[in-house]
Structure formats: structure tokens, C-alpha cells
Amino acid sequence: MNYALMVRTTDLENNNFEQGVNYISETAYKFLSKSKVYGGEIIMNKIGSAGKIYLMPCLKRPVSLGMNAFMLRLNENMNTLFAYFYLTTKFGVWQISKRVKGAVTKTIRKDAVRAIPIIVPPINLQNQFAEKIGLIEQQKKLAKQELQESEDLFNCLLQKAFKGELFSHP
């Protein structure tokens, strides 16, 4: 029964793929072959936060896309990381938001997404961009880890100071 994770946009939003997640059977996973995701795909919310873009992480296990989202399939002239960052710029968000419909429940349709104008520089420039972004993302991740370690150390020292354990007494 718990063969494949059925990823929802709430899972992507919270970057949580372990707790409170939904699973589908192997039969359902095979049946839903068009919705298989492997990591690196651009996912868009169809309803609610319609038009919200996510980059699917590689989870190294069978994953199927949930019902209220769709995957943007790009041709070989587009680098996925370049397209993702393009669509998350102010211009990209504006282009998407212009195509979202509905007063109460916001929705976006595939044909509206297909109508979004996207610049397509030569693939080698897109790849260079993606490579540089990858390095920046690695640096950001390392900086977050180092910040967390610094905060943990500070809190540990603070507790010791309040307990009077920071300085040794003769």
C-alpha cells in the first residue's frame, strides 16, 4: 500500500516528505505513469495557491504527483533550473499571476501556462547559469548549516553561563 509517495504541494511548500504524507500502491503508481516524478522537475500548483512554482527534490524513491498540481515538461532547448529561476523572478511571477483565474478559488489551466512567454537563450548559456546557481545554492545551504551550528553552540554556552558552569572556580 505504501509503495510510492504521492507528493502534494503542501509537502513541497513545507519541504516535508516524511511526516503526514500520502502514499499510493505499486499498482496505482504504475497506472499513474504520467505523474511519476524523479527530482529536478518544475511543479506548479493548479488550485488554491494557483501558479506557485516548486522545484521537485530528488527523494531517491518512487514518487507520484498529487492531484492539484502539474509538472511542466520542457523540451531539450530548456534547462530546468534556468526555467525554474526564470519563472520565480518578479516578471515570471507576474506572467503567471496574470493567467490565474477565479475570485474565491484561484486556479490556473495548462493552456494558460503554455501561453507564458519565456526567453530561451542558447542552451550553453542556460547551462552556465544553472551551474553558477547550483554553486550559490550549495553555499547558501552550507551557510545555513553553519548558522544553525553557531546558534546551537551559543545556546549551549548560554545554558552553561546561567548554570555557572562557564568559568572554573579555584
Image (cartoon, grey):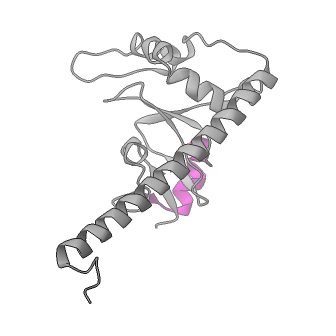
The question of residue 39 being in magenta is answered with no
Residue 33 % position (x, y)? 61, 47
Tell me which residue sits at (28%, 76%) in the image. Answer: 166
Residue 29 % position (x, y)? 55, 54
Specify whether 66 is left or right of 154. Answer: right
Specify whether 13 is left or right of 87. Answer: left
Q: Residue furthest front?
A: 170
The question of residue 26 being in magenta is answered with yes
Tell me which residue sits at (57%, 56%) in the image. Answer: 59
Q: Quadrant of the C terminus?
A: bottom left
Residue 113 % position (x, y)? 51, 18
Q: State how many labels appear.
A: 0
Tell me which residue sits at (21%, 21%) in the image. Answer: 104
* Above or below: residue 47 compared with residue 121: below
> Which residue is more in the foreground, 10 or 169?
169
> Which residue is more in the foreground, 85 or 67?
85
Residue 152 % position (x, y)? 36, 64
The magenta stretch is: 22-38
Q: Residue furthest bottom?
A: 170
Tell me which residue sits at (26%, 24%) in the image. Answer: 105
* Above or below: residue 14 compared with residue 104: below
* Above or below: residue 102 compared with residue 128: above
> Which residue is more in the foreground, 159 or 97?
159
